[in-house]
Image: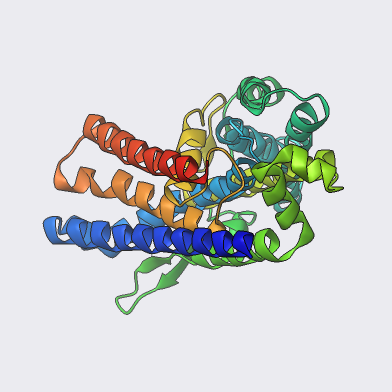
Amino acid sequence: MQNTRLSGNSSRKFDLQRIVVLAVVIVLAAVFSIFSRDFRKFSTVVTLLDSFYYFCFIAIGVTFCLISGGNDLSVGTGMVCYALIGGFCITKLGLPTWAGMLVTIACGLVFGVLNGFLVSVMNLPAFIATLCTMLITRGLGSVVCGGAVNWPARSSPNGWFRNLFKLMVLNSSGKKTPVPVGVIPILLAVIIMSLILNKTRIGRYIIAIGSNKEAARLSGVNVVKYQMSAYIISGFFAGLAGIAYVCATTSSITPGSGAGLELDAIGGAIIGGTSMTGGVGSVFGTLLGILILTLLKNGLPKIGLGQDWQNIITGLVLIFAIYIDVLKNRKKA
């Protein structure tokens, strides 16, 4: 009975945190809209969402690793590497666009399996294991592709894939206007992965491993299998992020880029309520956390604050979120 009450209290506190994060999203959007006329433009919203898509995808995957008590530092450079290889298969090897997209996702799955093997089977610390694969993916794209790769342009016959995240429709004046339909796959991903995390065996076991790995093992949970599953999910979403990156943001992929994106993904998950020590997290909370960081990155320049101030303010927000997580862990102890 006591454990039930504690669980209920923890759930209510977590729900309260998500409400607070949602309120912060609304306040930030209101402040930037009041102080910047440019921020209220539809084009700004489209630009904001373009970067939000791939940030959100990699953060959803990282959330599962964090909840399991681990981490994944390879998602940033990995996202770029997978998109490079997928684009190379299209433009250099002549594969259909859909096949190149599948290759992009498959590369993510391969590295997800590799990360899971290193962490769950070889028992390497997640920080070290994924740091190593981050370095591998940073160089692998260049070795395989030999340089920058261009995915098909929207105007080409193979450019249909760009409509998955941004449709171009004619407005009343006869000009083409972008419609950010990418919110649909993002919301579907959030709903599906929330259900997997909270309503399925794989999700419950990932949470259990993050809460107490040894207790989960003694309870009969196949720790290796389900810990590896968290990294496979992360790799899969890094592959999806690679597709979103080229669909909505750019046509040219440069080898060796993407470093630092993993920090935004991890930061967004933590802001959204996912604990760095594992056992607690929410996919919906991660979506809100990434939305806060995206608003800061796009809104601060609109009110005249440069890159340095953006980094400072984002760092302060992360410090506050991490401190809240530390306080929650102290109360648990």
Instruction: Quadrant for residue 122, please give it.
Output: top right
Display colour scheme: rainbow
308 sits to left or right of 279 = left
Image quarter in which the N terminus is found: bottom right
Name the residue furthest left.
35
Residue at the (47%, 51%) spot, across then down: 273
Q: Is residue 228 above or below residue 53?
A: above
Q: Nearer the viewer, residue 300 or 333?
A: 333
Q: Nearer the viewer, residue 77 or 3?
A: 3
Q: Position of residue 153 (x, y in %)?
A: 54, 49
94 sits to left or right of 82 = right
Residue 232 in view? yes
Residue at the (53%, 55%) spot, across then down: 154
Instruction: Quadrant for residue 39, please give it.
Output: bottom left
Q: Nearer the viewer, residue 161 or 79?
A: 79
Instruction: Quadrant for residue 231, please give it.
Output: top right
Q: Is residue 86 above or below residue 163?
A: above
Q: Position of residue 11 (x, y in %)?
A: 52, 62
Q: Is residue 94 above or below residue 197?
A: above
Residue 94 in view? no
Q: Position of residue 102 (x, y in %)?
A: 75, 49
Q: How many marks?
A: 0
Q: Position of residue 52 (x, y in %)?
A: 44, 52
Residue at the (69%, 41%) spot, across then down: 212
